[in-house]
Amino acid sequence: MLNVYFTVDVEIWCNSWVNLDEKFPQAFREYIYGPTGKGDFGLPYQLRVLNDHGLKGVFFVEPLFSTRFGAQPLAEIVGLIREAKQEVQLHLHTEWVDEAKVPLLIGIQGKRQHLMYFSENEQATLIKTGLRLMHEAGSTEINAFRAGSFAFNVDTLRALNTNGITFDSSYNASQFGLNSGVLPGETIVEPIKWNDVYEYPMTVFNDGTSGLRHAQLTACSFSEMEGLLWKALESGRTSFVILSHSFEMLNRARKMPDPIVISRFQKLCAFMHKNRDSFCMQGFHDLVPHALQTQPTPLTSPIWRTGIRMLEQAYSRKFI
């Protein structure tokens, strides 16, 4: 049995930092509800499809935006997820720190795009603030975290431990993971224990081109995802972490549904439901952690599957 973590980063962007208060209502609708002329394809859609298939998702919710726009929108997001009986966890994008109406940190001016650009004490304060905001919004069972853009470091893990958070899922070997300071010189692809925090890394794979690619609905064809899941199971892996976003079922303009990504999501959910004797869609609540002492090499996917995905992506860029 392979534990699969379908993780969704829930966040809101206004596409620039000008006229935020004017732009926010429309941005909230686009990034959370995903309205289009063919129906809504945002967070409620993802929750419904998961529940229709009896599957568990992990929703990493970004709360710092509420320090600018108020508590109600965050409570609405948390309420949607809790009503669907899915799992709520904590996500932080520090681009919002200097937008807060009440300063979150002393002496911070201007944008610091990534959490890792803050000191350990500053990170601990921001995580504590995020927990407070989430608790006030109705989520009191947070035990897992993901840094925005996967941009974390060892100070982040220390700050999580300070705040009593057991699990982190910020390590992504295709982005900042190799420079995070966690097990320097190693590529982490399976859970590890770092002091008292368990790191559950993004699943990454070699697609036959250059570098590593992470398992994300917009970055992988269903054929690639299916093949990787079977390969992970057959090779004895213990976890498989997939990434999505609350707005990922829309095209890049967020005006129309993206039929390719929607099809990937629907096929993945049907696959997981059909093969529940081999794969368990898992969350972090009540999870008994498992850590490995040595790391296997990243998974590989054959080049012909990469070709299928490239054709899909080319079609999407031109027509969707």
Image (cartoon, helix red, strand yellow):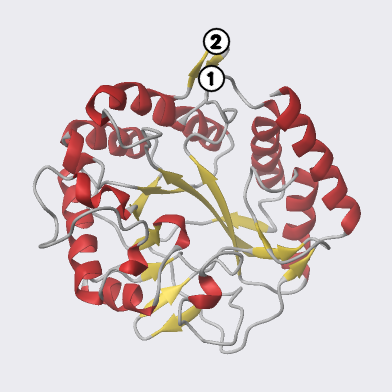
Q: Which of 55 and 57 is in front in this view?
A: 57
Label drawn at residue 255: 1
From the viewer's perspective, is residue 304 above or below residue 266?
A: below
Q: Which amino acid type corresponds to the residue marked 2 in the rendered image?
A: Gly
Q: Where is residue 118 in the image (x, y as percent from the top left)?
A: 28, 69
Kindly tell me whether residue 19 is visible in this rendering.
yes
Q: Which of 222 and 121 is in front in this view?
A: 121
**The N terminus is located in which quarter?**
bottom right
**Could you give the CA–CA distance between mark 1 and mark 2, rounded to whole angstroms?**
8 Å
Label drawn at residue 37: 2
Q: Quadrant of residue 298?
A: bottom right
Q: In which quarter of the image is residue 228?
A: bottom right
For marks 1 and 2, the one nearer the N-term is 2
Kindly tell me whether residue 191 is visible in this rendering.
no
From the viewer's perspective, is residue 251 above or below residue 105?
A: above
**The C terminus is located in which quarter?**
top right
124 left or right of 152 in image: left
From the viewer's perspective, is residue 268 above or below residue 228?
A: above
Residue in view at x 56 percent, y 28 percent? 250
Label drawn at residue 209: none
Residue in view at x 62 percent, y 63 percent? 203
Foreground mark, 1 or 2, reads: 1
Q: Which amino acid type corresponds to the residue marked 1 in the rendered image?
A: Lys
Task: Check disc 1 and report its element: helix, strand or loop.
Answer: loop
- Contact check, label 1 and label 2, Cβ < 8 Å: no
Q: Where is residue 31 in the image (x, y as percent from the top left)?
A: 42, 31
Q: Where is residue 291 in the image (x, y as percent from the top left)?
A: 51, 81
Other-residue count near label 1 (Cα within 10 Å), few / some / many at <14 / 14–19 / ≥20 = some
